[in-house]
Image (cartoon, rainbow, N blue to C red):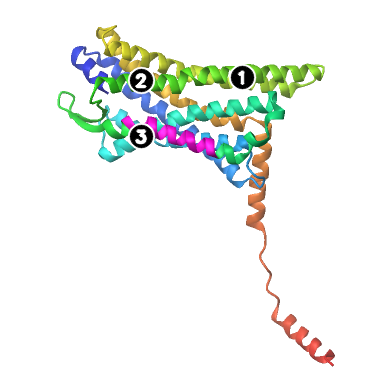
Amino acid sequence: MENETTSELGCNHTDAWDWVYSMQPAYMSVICFFGVLGNSLVLCVFCLQPRPASVADVYLSNLAVADLLMVSCLPFWVVAVTNRFHWTFGEPMCRLVGTVIGMNYQCSVLFLTLVSVDRYLVLTRPLTRGRRRRAFWARAICLGVWVAGISLSFPAVLFRSVRFFPHLGISACYLAYPHEGWRLRYNVSVAVVGFLVPVPVVSFCSYHIAKAVCHSRKLRRGGGGAEGKAARLVLAVLAAFVLCWLPYQLLTFLDTLDHYQVISGCTWAHVLDIGEQLATYLGYSNSALNPFLYAIVGKHFRQRAREAFGAARRRRRRPGPRPRPLNADVASSKHTGSTRM
């Protein structure tokens, strides 16, 4: 929002912003709808399944929670962008929404990395499962990820507020750093934790997963159609992650250069302002794709969904103890009375 106000003062390119105001809310609404639908379905299946949770279930359920929380905050920004970034929900909600989105962005990326590492260990290191793959340790790791996400989202808690901009006539939910070092520190942490570390790890795991799947297919003399599908799914997951988040990371880097005047100018300001808006929500769309790529398209997940909803349906239909008819009780008492010694 800071760059947006600067650019509107220096350069009056209103046509591009009118396009953002009209297009962005619809795009965010689609992300929110599919993200809530897919992640809610994943959580329902994991909560209703009769079998105990595995390590993969723990990671995928936490990933679904992080993605669901993130997309659930998007309606606030749909309203704000529709009103040309005028924030009508008050400062507490401004801080809460910014904190939840920032925290769950970091957590979502880290849980994606954990899912890839877990699949890598299952397929390529089956003998190392044992103690490290127990669900207890997986839950402990997930707790550490949530703590890390909360820690990395502190700037939103500390520095985000609602500020009135008289030249625009709006009160915007605004992230104002008290010192320039905070901006650089936040951008570096987003780049390192959110992309530079996860992408090599996920790429390494995806390569070895695909290699192991293809090797298994060759041992079956080319008869493994399911293995080929699994390999393509692994590559699709990696491609979706990179394509969704790479533009955001590149624009964050360029924004840092622009802020320190390594690059400058009216054109750069508008490219960065509008590009950051588009790239941010392109990245958020990964939270709507995750449940479909990681869970719903899988044969095992569909089988588990049938088991979970079938078990829930049976529990709902299970009859309670049937009351005995009164005449049966009377007849029984007469019978026992007549045969009593």
Q: Position of residue 327 (x, y in %)?
A: 72, 82
Nearer to us: label 3 or label 2 = 2
Say if the magenta span includes residue 152.
Answer: yes
* Residue at the disc numbered 1: 206
Q: Amino acid at mark 2?
A: Asn
At horizontal 18% and vertical 16% (from top left) the residue drawn is 9
Q: Which residues are magenta?
A: 140-155
**Horizontal placement of 285 versus 270: left or right?**
right
Does any portion of residue 302 appear in the rendered image?
Answer: yes
Q: Which mark is residue 318?
A: none
Classify residue 238 by image quadrant.
top right
Say which quadrant the C terminus sits in: bottom right
Q: Amino acid at mark 1?
A: Ser
Q: Secondary structure at mark 3?
A: helix
**Neighbours of disc 2 within 10 Å: few (<14), some (14-19), many (20+):** some
Classify residue 213 by image quadrant.
top right
Cα–Cα gap, marks 3 and 2: 16 Å
* Residue at the disc numbered 3: 99
Closer to the chain start, of discs 1 and 3, is: 3
Q: Position of residue 111 (x, y in %)?
A: 52, 30
